């Protein structure tokens, strides 16, 4: 296992931010951590990356106990933070070169900047960049040491759809190279699209951990939506796919020949999350 | 600690600080302030000019010039009004009105009456000295003998004839001011790293908190020595015992760094840091500023660490003091450096962990 968290707990005073959570992540896997703000996602990342030591439990990354050997872990991980934390008075190139120097690696910075579509602004100071561009610099910084494990905290936050899509493609490309990726987000479609497994975290606890498909199948409600023409206009009927009467009712509607549209509706992760926690992800 | 990380951090901090207008302004202002040096008098006026209005050509006047031992020069006025006007205008610092029956009173054993006039703002020491000279003169006139004080001994360094001009006395002020500005630079670098969140990014690389602290300390010492050297070159004041001067500058630079580390560890917020730093900044300059406020002797300044630094620098530059002569000052500065350094490290490591 590349990441092993065992009963990790962290409190800020009386507030328990992360409450005895355990999980494992395999090599080449993308695990998505989904949860509303304040659910404990960022605190979990801080413990996994050695920024905070768990008050209880243990974290092992790449075979090293993070609390005891943080630097052995830091050599081989890349972290993309949620908040923008770049040196504003340094250029993009200077920012990346500084981190390359810290890792003592020789890297083709231009190639990295081309990858995140920032080569044109390589020598611009970070303070002059838009929020989305700064986000791409932070993502590039996380890749600077060609890490074995990537911790990405809201990596597409603030990006336009095209930039977000290019970042997602890079994430998938890194996965295909065998990199393990720990992704925290509150963007459900992104989590659904990228993650091999998803963990729903709420009030510091993991309330579900499975593949997106399994979560939706197990906890979501699959429906057949049929719109029928009537004398007064249209009437829509929703039939639960797993109900015993649905096949007969669907047959009846089809024989009627007044169907305007018919389609199936999959359960969404949002519905799954509401079902599990009683609250919405955006809360 | 990793030397390669420390090197990278130093390079980055150097770039960040020279691109920070406030830090740059502080550094340049510290240097430019030293140009006040050239606006100050370069020599010391050792002779006092005294006004005299003598109504009846008294013998007392010739006795006075003898008693004043060459430190006094007399300017005779024809009228009391003329003399008083000259003193009021500041042309002379004091004046004596000798009445017409003065010699008769003295020789008859009567208590003579004599009026003294002083320029406003004249120091008490000066007035006392002047009164002593007058009394000695009267005694001489009365008994025909010189006053009984015939021998004197100077305790400590005898500076007679080689008093230090204000210009040279002001040198410690520029150096202390520059060092205090560097203290502000260090604390800004520390606070900024926290406030920008970049510290988190650095600490998830092979760099440790010790590397960050070491890099900022090195930057601080180098900047401090650089700025002090520029000031000393501008004021042509690299002189005296080199070893003693080097010790003062090094301990001063370490003082700026250790206090900068400590103050920088007290807040995460850049605006808050200006408050945390500006108050100590003003207090620390006070001991070096006293040179511009004559006759003010505040024993309380001995509780301000820079007092010992200013004193040691002044002794080296203006009296040619060697290490042994300023050893006690250097020891106190070294202890203060160590205390603030340990406090700063302790506080920063707590913050960084």
Image (cartoon, rainbow, N blue to C red):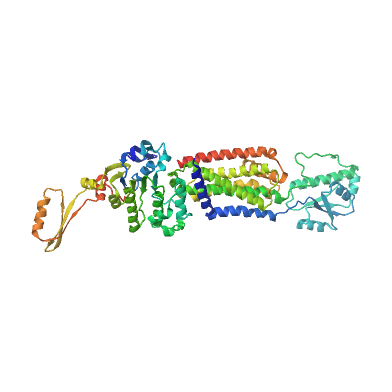
Q: Indicate the position of residue A46 as horizontal and vertical percent values.
A: 39, 43
Residue A205: percent from left, percent from top = 31, 41
Question: As displayed, is residue B211 above or below residue A260?
Answer: above
In the foreground, B58 or A101: A101
Depth order, front residue of A263/B71: A263
Residue B65: x and y in percent read 86, 49
Q: Nearer the viewer, residue A200 or A36?
A: A200
Q: Is residue B311 visible?
A: no
Residue B339 lies in quadrant: top right
Q: Position of residue B152 (x, y in %)?
A: 82, 39
Vertical position of residue A264 compared to residue B333: above or below? below
Q: Is residue B340 above or below residue A226?
A: above
Count every numbered label the image shows and give the total: 0
> Horizontal placement of A40 versus A224: left or right?
right
Q: Does the rendering let one see residue B117? A: yes
- The residue depicted at 81 percent of the width and 52 percent of the height is B50
Q: Quadrant of the N terminus of chain A?
A: top left
Query: Which residue is rendered at x = 27% and y = 43% of the image?
Result: A209
Left or right: residue B338 versus residue A148 is right
Direction from residue A265 to residue B260 in the image, left or right: right
Q: Residue at x 80, y 46 (%)?
A: B131
């Amino acid at each position: 296992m590349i990441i092993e968290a065992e009963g990790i707990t962290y409190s800020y005073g009386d507030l328990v931010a992360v409450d005895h959570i355990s999980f494992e992540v395999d090599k080449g896997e993308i695990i998505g951590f989904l949860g509303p703000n304040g659910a404990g996602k960022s605190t979990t990342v801080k413990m996994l990356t050695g920024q905070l030591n768990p008050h209880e439990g243990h974290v092992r990354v790449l075979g090293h106990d993070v609390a005891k050997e943080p630097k052995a872990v830091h050599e081989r991980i890349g972290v993309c933070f949620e908040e923008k934390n770049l040196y504003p008075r340094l250029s993009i190139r200077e920012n990346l070169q500084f981190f390359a120097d810290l890792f003592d690696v020789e890297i083709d910075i231009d190639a990295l900047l081309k990858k995140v579509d920032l080569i044109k602004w390589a020598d611009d100071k970070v303070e002059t960049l838009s929020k989305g561009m700064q986000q791409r610099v932070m993502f590039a910084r996380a890749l600077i040491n060609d890490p074995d494990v990537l911790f990405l905290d809201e990596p597409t936050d603030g990006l336009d759809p095209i930039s977000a899509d290019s970042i997602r493609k890079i994430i998938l490309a890194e996965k295909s190279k065998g990199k393990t990726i720990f992704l925290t987000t509150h963007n459900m479609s992104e989590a659904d699209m990228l993650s091999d497994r998803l963990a729903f975290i709420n009030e510091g606890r993991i309330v579900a951990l499975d593949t997106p498909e399994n979560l939706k199948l197990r906890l979501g409600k699959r429906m057949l939506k049929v719109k029928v023409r009537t004398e007064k206009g249209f009437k829509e009927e929703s039939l639960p796919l797993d109900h015993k009467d649905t096949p007969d009712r669907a047959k009846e509607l089809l024989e009627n020949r007044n169907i305007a549209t018919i389609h199936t509706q999959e359960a969404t992760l949002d519905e799954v999350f509401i079902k599990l926690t009683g609250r919405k992800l955006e809360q | 600690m990793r030397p390669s990380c420390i090197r990278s951090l130093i390079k980055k901090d150097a770039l960040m600080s020279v691109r920070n207008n406030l830090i740059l302004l502080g550094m340049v202002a510290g240097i430019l302030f030293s140009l006040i040096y050239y606006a100050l008098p370069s020599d010391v006026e050792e002779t006092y000019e005294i006004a005299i209005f003598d109504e009846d050509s008294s013998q007392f006047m010739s006795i006075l010039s003898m008693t004043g031992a060459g430190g006094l020069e007399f300017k005779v006025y024809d009228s009391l009004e003329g003399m008083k006007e000259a003193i009021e205008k500041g042309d002379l610092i004091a004046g004596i009105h000798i009445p017409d029956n003065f010699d008769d009173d003295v020789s008859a054993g009567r208590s003579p009456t004599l009026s003294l006039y002083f320029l406003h703002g004249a120091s008490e020491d000066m007035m006392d000295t002047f009164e002593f000279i007058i009394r000695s003169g009267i005694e001489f006139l009365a008994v025909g003998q010189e006053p009984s004080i015939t021998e004197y001994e100077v305790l400590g360094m005898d500076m007679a004839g080689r008093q230090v001009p204000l210009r040279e006395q002001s040198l410690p002020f520029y150096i202390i001011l520059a060092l205090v500005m560097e203290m502000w630079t260090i604390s800004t670098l520390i606070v900024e790293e926290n406030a920008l969140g970049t510290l988190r990014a650095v600490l998830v690389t092979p760099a440790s908190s010790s590397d960050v602290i070491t890099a900022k300390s090195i930057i601080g010492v180098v900047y401090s020595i650089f700025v002090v050297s520029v000031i000393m070159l501008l004021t042509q004041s690299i002189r005296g015992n080199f070893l003693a001067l080097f010790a003062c500058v090094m301990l001063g630079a370490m003082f700026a760094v250790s206090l900068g580390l400590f103050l920088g560890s007290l807040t995460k917020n850049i605006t808050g840091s200006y408050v945390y730093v500006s108050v100590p900044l003003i207090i620390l300059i006070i001991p070096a500023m006293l040179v511009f406020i004559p006759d003010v002797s505040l024993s309380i300044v001995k509780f301000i660490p820079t007092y010992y630094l200013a004193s040691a620098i002044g002794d080296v530059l203006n009296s040619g003091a060697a290490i042994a002569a300023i050893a006690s000052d250097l020891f106190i500065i070294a202890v203060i450096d160590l205390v603030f350094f340990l406090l700063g490290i302790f506080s920063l490591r707590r913050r960084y962990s």
